[in-house]
Image (cartoon, coloured by chain):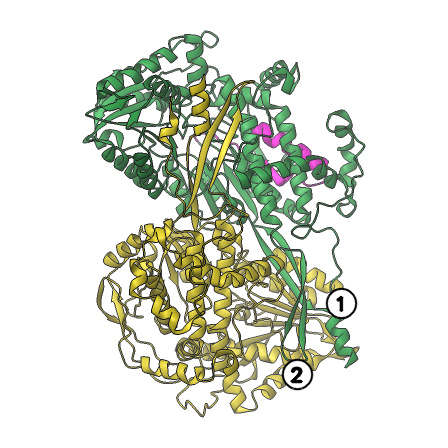
Chain colours: A yellow, B green
């Protein structure tokens, strides 16, 4: 039998086997990186380059290869790395970047945000800046019955492209997003209420770093299985069976990325890019209060995708309004193979329970704790705490809500401090930090959602002694900004009804406990029952830190110990810190690990008797 | 500020950093591998060895290290590998192994299977051999309210042990299971109805190989993140922030493994061992019709675990009866963090939708297709097909159910063969294969479930022309065995109500199509709509094979091409073939890939200012 004739033609353009040195021609090696030359090359002509001949994408991969390799090394070592400069300086971004970004943002206001995607019927968009003005931007409102099939139709060519091609394109998208960081910063600021610096960093380079991290993981996973192998099994003394096997990564389908209102890009990018580079189409569904940053992202990405000859419907936007939400409909559609969700616990649970046709990655919320046991330098400690609880008015999923302090006080560098003295030091540090109104509004930003303002009132009404009132701080530049400083309440461990619940926003409970043992127990239990993304402890006793580590690890929460200076418990560094453990109710996944990417694609294989066997048979 | 004092004590016994050469002392290097010496060493004394001093487990790891390394190399290359001999010979297993295994099995019959696990209330066990006799074995019936907390209590010490320790123990369990392969083979044969040889191979060494594969993946995943790093970020020209970070793998909790009635060990081992080595406790819930093979497995594993000083409740058995099933209760318990399920599509969907508190891995079932387009050697082809559809009476999840053949016939080595001639050749090959009753019963085995016998009758009643009757074949050794040969029906593509549904068992539809295009379309659609685990094609045209590959890959099914001789579409080789793609309704996971193991544990981290920074500060 001549099985040789049955052997499929070898497809040459597939991803390399594991360990292969990165290949691909460098036809554009002489072209200048970025700028006009790139843009000119990458328009209409590129669309007509047949994929088989496309060295274009190999070039993008080569161009961004060092970034990818550095990211890959960083995630293995977990040391410091960043690919995108976090300082919004002219040196990093060009002298006109700041003004250009602001102008670009302002040009978006009070107009239509056009996206040339199929199935648009009418518009959506009711964003209002927490700094006081409606953005007045309208987005296409999609008909999912048209949009989802269009997204599906874009997949086959994308899935057949090499991993290098997809990764190269994703890294080019990131590069262009980075260049747009000032525009995106303004968009993030005026949807989330973050201060400008935070909006720039968290919405721009830090989000881009998290995206790169996800891409680096995906790249590694996509290269774990070789393209092909000849499998040989000796079945008797003389006979060997030989099969040629080919393996191909295939995507899960259309991925839905559900954004949140407070970190629209930072939380959406990892899932978005992980799904995209593994061959899926991605539908981006922003929070109705923070559409613009993701709309700009979709716009930039569609441009690059089209330039490289792929169907731009690989990335589409689903904008909706608070009064006509589409998320539940979207995530349960049969076309949706992956869901990435960031938002409330309640909605996250609904998705986990109902989108059972899809692989679901969630980041929900929780009750974050801080334990004060003993300190060397109370000023350094309370200064750090003050910044933590003030930053973005406590609207970070990583902000500490409950600070557990022994009712009998603590040891501070050999001296005793009573509970009230510690509480006073914290309140004093917050007051000092926010004493300068200009600094205050930059740190506090604005309150994203009116519900959060109501929650402050509710917290006061519910009980606890008010140690510090939440105040409406004036913002000179934006007189209508919704700014609130932290409310600090004193209570004790018996009042679980107050603190053993999530109170999102600038609300801090100082909880008197019977001692550090109880403090740790409450921190761990809050995490176990309500979820927690962070936990912090201050102690000069290594034994207590060890004990805390055991107990909070058992509750699935990472631990930050004795942070002072310029590192805060609510910061999470890409390439080093795993954000959300996936080990408690605050979420089922982490940013980022192998589990975050490995299940976004599957491996399919074909097997056929090897030619050599046929020849051997022919010779018999 | 002296943050140095706040630095936790370094724990020495953690897993090594990525890339570290395997360490650990070899205190037992002089001891003979296995046998009496091992057993003596590993009893009561070992239990009292404190984990900190335990070189015992390092020794197990060292002892099995080469096996692990070879498995790790194989999964990266996907070439042939096997660690456990598949030939049930005296040379491989010892001259008395066969008789000893049979005697051990027979000693189990009509008696209590004792497992010293907590929370037993009464007994379960109603297994009846498909070869004709009730096994008469009673197992502990567990009280989940007692058993699950006991399983949870076993986790902390196990989770804190090193990955080497856990993997070493798992590999020792496998080694001992391998030595018990004959006993397990009899247990598999008399619960599943498999013929002895198949029961030995699939229930013994092949299942052990699949377990080793899962362990090798888990080992790689557990070593992706280092134990620790000092993270340094330059925050100004003169200032550097330094954090000592520690990382620890933590398990998800209690894992439930839901076994099936046809391949109780092969399908359960990968999830069982993947969960165990990643630090979880595992509760094994066998199918009520096939408890014994997994009960033996649990017994062997508990022995090794206890010898090594861990709590044997890390692995427990939940036996139940068909009239009082516990699976739904078990998998939705809050303690359950992972579910591995093999079984019917309907139940699998229920678990996917309802066990939303857990990470769920399913292998369900589907409608497998074969496409005959053209052949070089019809005898070689139909001989292969005859074995495929006869083996274990079509009760493999990989058996082809529908064989699509052009109504106009095919080309066979240049000659035309009509549909009926092809059909006749297939029927003739089955008749020849099963013509010798002794060979027939070894190939067919017995029908596991009476429902499958009824389904044969139902298939006849539903329609299609009977080309070959299903027959009750006499088994001399077991006169009461429930043996049925394949029913072969002829129909055409218009009769989707017949073939476009799963008809589990020895039921084969030869479906006349308008041509190979339609054949491929139907094969792909069956996979998309009902799931499929395998797809086969016979064609001498490489273009058609390419086209088939595209279309069935798009439907998420692997493809086997032109198989003849000793390789069959229903075989899946560990370390090379991915079993179930996870890309269609036949299941959401694969055996095995990184995604199968990476989410069974999470990484937790702690961070603390590095001592060096404190010194630098002190110097200021």
Q: Which residue is mark 2?
A: A425
Q: How far is disc 2 from disc 1 in space, using C-alphas?
A: 21 Å
Q: Judge if badges 2 and 1 mark residues of a common chain.
A: yes
Residue sitting farthest toward the front? A30
According to the image, label 1 marks what residue? A541
Horizontal side of A357 relative to A596 (left or right) equals left
Instruction: Indicate yes or no whether the magenta region holds residue A401.
Output: no
Quick check: marks 2 and 1 in contact, CB under 8 Å?
Answer: no
Number of other residues with Cα within 10 Å of mark 1, as a class: few under 14, some 14 to 19, many 20 or more: some
Residue A374 position within the rendered picture, expressed as x and y whole percent measured from the top left: 72, 73
Q: Is residue A332 above or below residue A570?
A: above
Quadrant hosting residue A238: top right
Q: Is residue A260 visible?
A: yes
Callout 2: SS: helix
Q: Earlier in the sequence, mark 2 or mark 1?
A: 2
Q: Nearer the viewer, residue B540 or B199?
A: B540
- Residue A433 has which mark? none
Tell me residue B49's x, y (percent).
78, 42
> Which of pointers 2 and 1 indicates the residue nearer the eye?
1
Can you see residue A294?
no
Position of B41 with respect to B128 (left or right) is right
């Amino acid at each position: 039998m001549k099985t040789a004739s049955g052997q499929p033609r070898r497809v040459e353009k597939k991803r390399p086997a594991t360990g292969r040195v990165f290949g691909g021609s460098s036809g554009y090696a002489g072209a200048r990186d970025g700028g006009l030359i790139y843009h000119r090359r990458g328009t209409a002509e590129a669309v007509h380059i047949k994929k088989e001949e496309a060295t274009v994408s190999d070039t993008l991969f080569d161009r961004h290869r060092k970034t990818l390799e550095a990211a890959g090394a960083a995630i293995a070592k977990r040391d410091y790395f960043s690919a995108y400069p976090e300082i919004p300086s002219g040196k990093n971004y060009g002298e006109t970047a700041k003004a250009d970004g602001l102008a670009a943002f302002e040009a978006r206001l009070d107009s239509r945000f056009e996206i040339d995607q199929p199935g648009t019927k009418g518009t959506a968009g009711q964003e209002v800046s927490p700094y006081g003005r409606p953005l007045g931007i309208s987005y296409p409102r999609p008909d999912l019955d048209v949009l989802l099939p269009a997204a599906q139709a874009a997949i086959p060519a994308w899935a057949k492209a090499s991993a290098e091609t997809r990764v190269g394109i994703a890294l080019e998208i990131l590069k262009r997003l980075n260049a747009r960081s000032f525009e995106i910063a303004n968009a993030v600021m005026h949807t989330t209420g973050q201060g400008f610096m935070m909006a720039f960093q968290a919405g721009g380079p830090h989000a881009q770093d998290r995206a790169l991290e996800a891409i680096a993981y995906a790249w590694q996973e996509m290269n774990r299985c070789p393209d092909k192998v000849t499998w040989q099994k000796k079945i008797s003394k003389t006979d060997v069976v030989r099969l040629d096997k080919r393996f191909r990564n295939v995507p899960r389908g259309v991925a839905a990325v559900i954004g949140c209102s407070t970190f629209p890009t930072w939380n959406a990018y990892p899932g978005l890019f992980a799904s995209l580079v593994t061959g899926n189409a991605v539908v981006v569904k922003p929070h109705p209060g923070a559409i613009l940053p993701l709309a700009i992202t979709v716009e930039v990405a569609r441009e690059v995708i089209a330039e490289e000859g792929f169907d731009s419907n690989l990335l589409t936007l689903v904008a909706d309004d608070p009064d006509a939400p589409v998320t539940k409909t979207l995530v349960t559609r049969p076309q949706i193979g992956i869901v990435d969700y960031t938002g409330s616990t309640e909605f996250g649970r609904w998705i986990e329970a109902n989108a059972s046709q899809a692989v679901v990655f969630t980041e929900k919320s929780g009750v974050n704790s801080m334990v004060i046991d003993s300190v060397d330098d109370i000023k350094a400690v309370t200064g750090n705490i003050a910044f933590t609880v003030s930053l973005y008015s406590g609207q970070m999923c990583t902000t500490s809500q409950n600070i557990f302090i022994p009712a009998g006080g603590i040891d501070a560098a050999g001296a005793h401090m009573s509970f009230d003295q510690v509480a006073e030091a914290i309140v004093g540090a917050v007051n000092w930090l926010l004493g300068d109104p200009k600094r205050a509004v930059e740190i506090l930003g604005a309150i994203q959602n009116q519900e959060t303002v109501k929650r402050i009132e509710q917290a006061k009404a519910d009980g606890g002694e008010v140690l510090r009132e939440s105040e409406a701080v004036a913002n000179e530049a934006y007189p209508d900004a919704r700014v609130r400083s932290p409310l600090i309440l004193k209570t004790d461990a018996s009042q679980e009804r107050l603190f053993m619940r999530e109170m999102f926003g600038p609300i801090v409970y100082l909880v008197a406990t019977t001692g550090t043992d109880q403090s740790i127990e409450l921190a761990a239990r809050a995490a176990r029952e309500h979820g927690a993304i962070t936990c912090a402890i201050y102690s000069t006793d290594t034994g207590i830190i060890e004990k805390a580590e055991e107990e909070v690890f058992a509750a699935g929460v990472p631990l930050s110990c004795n942070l002072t200076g310029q590192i805060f418990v609510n910061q999470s560094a890409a390439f080093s810190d795993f954000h959300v453990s996936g080990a408690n109710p605050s979420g089922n996944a982490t940013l980022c690990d192998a589990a975050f990417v490995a299940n976004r694609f599957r491996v399919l294989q074909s097997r056929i008797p090897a030619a050599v066997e046929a020849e051997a048979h022919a010779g018999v």
